Amino acid sequence: MLLTGAEIVIRCLQEEKVEFVFGYPGGSVLYIYDAMFKQDQFKHVLVRHEQAAVHAADAYSRSSQKIGVCMVTSGPGVTNAVTGIATAYMDSIPLVVISGQVPTAYIGQDAFQECDTVGITRPCVKHNFLIKDVKDIAITLKKAFYLAKTGRPGPVLVDIPKDITNHKCEYDYPKSVTMRSYNPVTKGHSGQIKKALQLLLSAKRPMIYSGGGVILSDASNKLIKLVKALGFPITNTLMGLGGYPATDKQFVGMLGMHGTYEANMAMQNCDVLLAIGARFDDRVIGNPAHFNEVQRKIIHIDIDPSSISKRVKVDVPIVGNVPDVLEDLLKQLEAADEKSDAKALALWWKQIETWRAKDCLKYKQNSKVIMPQYVMEKLYEVTGGDAIVTSDVGQHQMWAAQYYKFDKPRRWINSGGLGTMGFGLPAAMGAHFANPKATVACVTGEASIQMCIQELSTCKQYRLPIKIINLNNRYLGMVRQWQEMFHGNRYAESYVDALPDFVKLAESYGHVGMHIDKPANVEAALREAFTTHKNELVFMDFITDQTANVFPMIAAGKGLSEMILAEDL
């Protein structure tokens, strides 16, 4: 069957059972959009900015088990998308990004809307391709989908010149693909798993630490089974929240820079540590030298060999797909004659409960000013802990992570690695398209929301009933917190003194706006938004305490046991 390059692109997306393409048309992709117009197997979602297209595709992927797809034009279309691509890359999210390019003969001629897409995106994609022949489109897109999902997932970009989308060739979509240079390991080494189990069973102060890899590989059920079988304490990273139920008594809270006192102290003082699908990054363990002061054995399970022993030396590395490795570990545990030291474990739990008794997340809610923590607690109550929560980056992100207890995976959608302001709203859009029956809440701040606020228009077009919880403290909150604590209260450029009337702004886009400035009205406003206005987008502008800070906190360069608690100040 003789098809144009554009028609082949569309057929390939249909073959991959794509449901939504998030994008923005432009000159270089017009043939593709024309071919898209003639089909009805998948829908196109028109965003208002290319960054939002990638964020929406990204969250679509995070909140489902599918590959997000987006499409942008050449030049500024691609450069606008780079922030979204880098966000997905840092958090290992499977995406396929199709970008238009100027016609082949114009490449390198400084043509209108030309840029070196392959060169620009190379550092922040898992792989990228420049198509040079119409015959290569089908096989390249097959490779792109395969690469995005397998091994350590990530975004893959396919750059297609305009003229190639109009050339014709025989269409043939390959059923499978093999790549000689790419063969990710899935099964963990049985000897290493045996060694890991011996260490775990001999531990006096064991600790399990899981990250985003558990979520991405859908290993949550196996993780729960293992933790229950061992009876050990467990902590999640910011990206790993929901991988283990937050309401379970073995869960000691999130760890890291704004983690709980009990999680960080247990992490620092354990003698055997099992790390699963996590990276030991700077926001998790703080200063590696301080972390290494305590002698402990470390077992690290990860699909990506380059992540193991990158920042912290590991004693038992296990490269493999997390669910496969956990399955093997569980089998060996069931078959083992040895049992863990119950007496030592009881003492260890006693110590953890002493740390837990500090109640490090307590705060004071007075009758006059809304505390942001209170809003998060009420959001959890009103939604029954069952919402998909997206966030931007900053104080509100940390409060959402601390006070919203995620019991299931793929419910907490945030930019962990890159820390991208503007992520929350387009992410909520993507999450809604993936889960049309779910309750979707976007927790944001008055600075973050303005970075992609134009997407309120997209929400109107597609009637997306997202609930926006804007914790409005009239500051760049996290910047202000650092300036207060480490820069002598010099609030350089962190005060936002030209804010719009968010209620009127939301209404101008055709949505419901609410202004809440009294603690007594918080719960009622949330209940009204989620019931009376269930089928509408509601923008809730909560006027919160300007001085509220996120605690516990570990300052840059400090270690896990060197936390600043609210009472220390």
Image (spheres, rainbow, N blue to C red):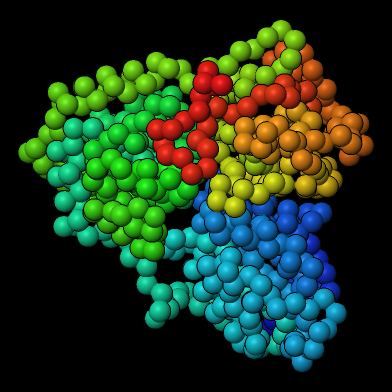
> Could you tell me residue 145's position as x and y percent?
53, 67
Foreground residue among 83 and 67: 83
Question: Image check: 478 left or right of 240?
Answer: right
Foreground residue among 268 and 366: 268
Examine the image and state in which quarter residue 469 appears. Answer: top right
> Could you tell me residue 165's position as x and y percent?
73, 81
In percent of the image, x 79 and y 68: which residue is there? Answer: 76
Foreground residue among 191 and 317: 317
The outermost residue toward the top is: 367
Question: Image check: 186 left or right of 450?
Answer: left
Question: Image check: 111 left or right of 230?
Answer: right
The outermost residue toward the front is: 488
Examine the image and state in which quarter residue 541 appears. Answer: top right
Which quadrant: the C terminus? Answer: top right
Question: Image check: 483 left or right of 145?
Answer: right
> Could you tell me residue 306's position as x and y percent?
39, 63
For residue 18, say whether it is visible: no
In percent of the image, x 68 and y 9: which residue is there? Answer: 366
In percent of the image, x 80 and y 89: which residue is there? Answer: 109
